[in-house]
Image: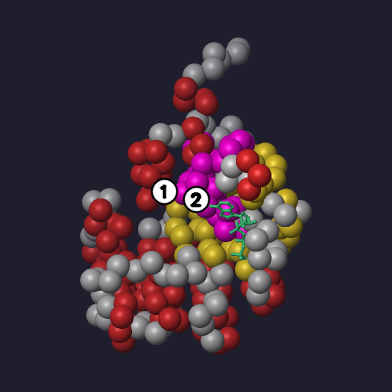
Amino acid sequence: MTTPATDHQATTDTTGSGGLRLDDVTLTLGDGDTAVTALDHVGLTVAPGEFVAVVGPSGSGKSSLLAVAGGLQRPTSGTVHIAGTELTALSDKERTAARLRHIGFVFQQSNLLASLTVKEQLLLPLHIDGRLDISARARADELIEAVGLTHRAGSRPHQLSGGERQRAGLARALMTSPAVLLVDEPTSALDRVRSAEAVQLIAEQTHERGTATVMVTHDTAIMDAADRVHEMVDGRLS
Ligand SMILES: Nc1ncnc2c1ncn2[C@@H]1O[C@H](COP(=O)(O)OP(=O)(O)OP(=O)(O)O)[C@@H](O)[C@H]1O
């Protein structure tokens, strides 16, 4: 029996993938002579529990890939599915809600809120989403310990080093157990030991919690921890 097409079907990932899927995604930035093809017909599928690294030179489109995969930027063409939902078919408001619930970002700059302590940074997303309970507080303590910041739980960002801010950003991203984790060079401000620990934590969370993780990086040590490595050159992924 054939089922007529409905709006619901248009926004449901029919492959059953709960992770991340980009199909034929192109992103053009700028206009006219200055237009740049930041992403050129990119296809990428990351299954739940899979840790994918994307390497490539500066300007090759790695940040653009994360921005589109995370719904921060609409692609010029192509589709993005997150946890079975077609992100590219949602309104701006729906996309923001999906981002809050399903996607964790770790940016190069930690983007912490200046007035909140480390622990408060972790609790805020759940507070906004009405899911702040005892188990959330316990998970915050657990993650703060996992990134080595227990002694800094009550500190505000200006009291932290660059590496500590980055680790707080990582713990915050993991707090909601996102379906998809998007990580932009997490280790640039960390020393080598801390860097290896941060990557280890991301790999563990990815495998234990079934997160679909994409990390863009120049760091070959991270590539070893990944399940798969893709290369990005001039907006094309191979
Ligand atoms: N707002 C914009 N307008 C026009 N071009 C842009 C814009 N943002 C980025 N670009 C261009 O798009 C291309 C891809 O940039 P992107 O930041 O995604 O690369 P990247 O691989 O993340 O680089 P890096 O490793 O230096 O962070 C580059 O050529 C860049 O100059």
The answer to which quarter of the image holds residue 228 is: bottom right
Q: Is the residue marked by circle 2 packed among few (<14), some (14-19), or many (20+) residues within 10 Å?
A: many
In which quadrant is the N terminus drawn?
A: top right
Q: Is residue 116 left or right of residue 71?
A: left
Q: Tag 1's secondary structure?
A: helix
Q: Which of disc 2 and disc 1 is earlier in sequence?
A: 2
For label 1, the residue is 99
Examine the structure image and report whether residue 148 is included in the region drawn in magenta: no
Please say which color scheme the image uses.
secondary structure
Residue 187 to residue 179: above or below = below
Where residue 34 appears, as percent x and y from the top left, is: 63, 48
- Cβ atoms under marks 1 and 2 closer than 8 Å: yes
Q: CA distance from mark 1 to mark 2?
A: 7 Å
Q: Quadrant of the C terminus?
A: bottom right
Neighbor class of circle 1 (other Cα within 10 Å; few <14, some 14-19, many 20+) is: some
Find the magenta span and give its range. 62-86
Residue at position x 47%, y 65% in the image: 106
Ligand 1 quarter of the rendering: bottom right
Which numbered dot is residue 70?
Answer: 2
Question: Relative to residue 217, is residue 73 drawn left or right?
Answer: left
The residue sitting at 38% across, 45% down in the picture is: 96
The reply to whether residue 116 is visible in this rendering is: yes
